[in-house]
Image (tube, helix red, strand yellow):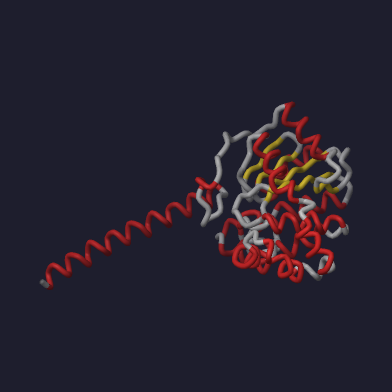
């Protein structure tokens, strides 16, 4: 009897060990590819990878920059045009955002920022600098890469009405914002007051709550992803630098700097 129990426990340990090894291997592969852990690739159709946009793609991008309701920043006639497909609940969007150092460190050495002793330079703050300096334009588009970013997206559109996009963006892309969107708000419109309160340092609470529940930007929740899919992309984050495509939370020096320097 004791031998049978021992054999059973050995078999069980082997099964558990194999499962844990497989899970670890999958997480490592996802990290290497820039796919957030905790999100399977089955959550969305993975498009064929493109590294350069076609003329038709560029025409579609141009329409985004001319859309008066779109989240567009900087001079739309600037020599450099960035497009970011993002999701405020997506971990790798947070990593690229540069205001959630906790998540960067949890993702491993590759994503640990310079300020924390690593070598990773997040792309979004660098893009913002170029936009502020008048050297580039940016279009921000929502794509549901992680599944809990709808309310965060609506909040960004609402904040933009008050010219407070970046203030709201940095709150949502913080560690606290990540936890709130993924564990409390979860696309629930009934959490509008909670989200508005969290964003009060950026936008007046009453305005934000009313805007979130008004439905005025609901069309962007389906419209923004349609633009992404029409161009052949669904993963978050994805960036365009003019016709060049960069997928994943690639560091500034790794994927962006050489392209941008050649255009300045």
Residue 252 x, y percent position in the rendering: 70, 50
Determine whether 61 is above or below 72 in the image: above
For this rendering, which residue is in front, 127 or 54? 54
Mark count: 0
- Quadrant of the image for the C terminus? top right
Locate residue 223: give its quadrant: top right
Residue 104 x, y percent position in the rendering: 61, 61
For this rendering, which residue is in front, 51 or 47? 47
Determine whether 58 is above or below 207 in the image: above
Residue 45 x, y percent position in the rendering: 55, 40
Apparent side of residue 30 relative to residue 163 in the rendered image (left or right): left
For this rendering, which residue is in front, 38 or 92? 38
Apparent side of residue 175 relative to residue 139 in the rendered image (left or right): left
- Quadrant of the image for the N terminus? bottom left
Q: Seen from this angle, which residue lies furthest bottom?
A: 2
For this rendering, which residue is in front, 193 or 168? 193
In this orientation, does residue 170 appear? yes
Residue 261 x, y percent position in the rendering: 78, 42
In this orientation, does residue 115 appear? no
Apparent side of residue 83 relative to residue 16 in the rendered image (left or right): right
Q: Seen from this angle, which residue lies furthest top?
A: 55
- Residue lying at 65% horizontally and 64% vertically, measured from the top left: 185
- Residue lying at 83% horizontally and 65% vertically, measured from the top left: 203
């Amino acid at each position: 009897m004791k031998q049978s129990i021992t054999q059973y426990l050995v078999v069980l340990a082997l099964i558990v060990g194999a499962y844990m090894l497989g899970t670890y291997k999958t997480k490592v592969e996802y990290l290497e590819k820039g796919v957030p852990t905790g999100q399977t690739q089955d959550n969305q159709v993975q498009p064929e990878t493109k590294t350069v946009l076609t003329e038709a793609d560029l025409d579609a991008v141009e329409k985004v920059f001319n859309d008066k309701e779109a989240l567009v920043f900087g001079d739309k006639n600037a020599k450099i045009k960035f497009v970011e497909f993002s999701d405020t609940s997506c971990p790798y969007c947070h990593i690229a955002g540069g205001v959630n150092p906790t998540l960067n460190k949890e993702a491993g050495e590759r994503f640990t920022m310079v300020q924390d002793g690593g070598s990773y330079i997040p792309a979004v703050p660098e893009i913002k600098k170029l936009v502020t300096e008048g050297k580039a334009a940016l279009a921000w588009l929502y794509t549901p890469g992680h599944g809990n970013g709808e309310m965060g997206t609506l909040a960004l559109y609402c904040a933009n009405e008050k010219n407070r996009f970046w203030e709201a963006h940095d709150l949502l892309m913080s560690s606290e914002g990540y936890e709130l969107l993924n564990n409390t708000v979860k696309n629930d419109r009934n959490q509008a007051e909670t989200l508005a309160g969290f964003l009060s340092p950026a936008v007046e609470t009453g305005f934000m709550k009313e805007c979130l529940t008004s439905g005025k930007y609901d069309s962007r929740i389906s419209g923004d992803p349609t633009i992404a899919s029409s161009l052949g992309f669904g993963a978050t984050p994805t960036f365009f630098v003019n016709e060049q495509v960069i997928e994943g939370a690639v560091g500034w020096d790794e994927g962006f700097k050489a392209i941008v320097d050649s255009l300045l």
